[in-house]
Image (cartoon, helix red, strand yellow):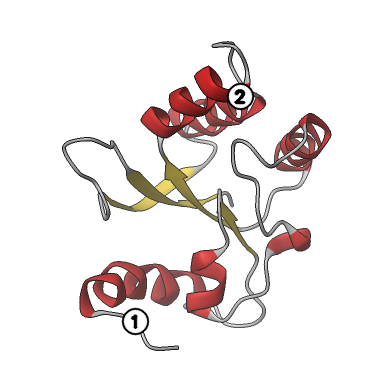
Amino acid sequence: MVIDSPTLNFIQPICTAVKSGGGESELLSLPYSYPNYFCGIAPWHGYVQTFFDTSSSATIYGLMDELETSPPKWIVYQRQLDTLRIHELAYNHGQPLEQRVLDELIERKLAEVSWRAMYTSDFGNSRWWDNQWILIRTR
């Protein structure tokens, strides 16, 4: 896969960290599986897209149940609260979407230090869109 230098510089530390343990890595990338593909790691439990307007409530709540009981070793989370809010307004009459509850779960786990942020990046951030990437180690 050919990617530009800024994207390579952003993704390489993620791939290095995830693969450093050796063996088969478990990686969940949210909302899209780009880090899985860049790093050559199959998407955890087949979660390949959990974006705001295309994922059912059952998918998001099922994912949250799995994250609570038996999470993957690694999660790459692209936190996009501005984009989430736009989708809530456009697709859910301004009411919170399930992904907001998923965000709260991830943030709670990080605040409790039961999960650890190992790497963060504002890759893709702009003055119009807040964009934060977090590489999380769950165990």
Mark 1 Cα-neighbour bin, 10 Å: few <14, some 14–19, many ≥20: few
User: Where residue 78 sits in the image (x, y, percent)?
Assistant: 44, 47
The answer to which of 70 and 8 lies nearer the viewer is 8
Residue sitting nearer the eye, 32 or 10:
32
* Picture layout, residue 18 above or below residue 70: below
Instruction: Please indicate, yes or no, whether residue 57 appears anywhere in the rendered image.
Output: yes
Q: Report which residue position mark 2 lands on.
A: 91
**Vertically, is 92 above or below 117?**
above
Task: Quadrant for the N terminus, please.
Answer: bottom left
> In this rendering, does residue 112 appear at all?
no
Measure the C-alpha gap from mark 2 to mark 1: 32 Å
Identified at 48% across, 30% down, the residue is 84
Q: Observer-nearest residue: 104 or 17?
A: 104
Q: Residue at x 40, y 48 (%)?
A: 134
Q: Is residue 82 left or right of residue 63?
A: left
Q: Residue at x 28, y 36 (%)?
A: 130
Disc 2 residue type (three-letter): Tyr
Q: Position of residue 48 (x, y in %)?
A: 68, 59
* Residue on which the image places disc 1: 3
**Element at badge 1?**
loop
Q: Position of residue 115 (x, y in %)?
A: 52, 42
Left or right side of 57 for 126: left
In the shown orientation, is residue 79 left or right of residue 47? left
Q: Earlier in the sequence, mark 2 or mark 1?
A: 1
The residue depicted at 26 percent of the width and 55 percent of the height is 123
Question: Residue 69: x and y, percent?
Answer: 78, 39
Dot 2, crowdedness within 10 Å: few (<14), some or many (≥20)? some
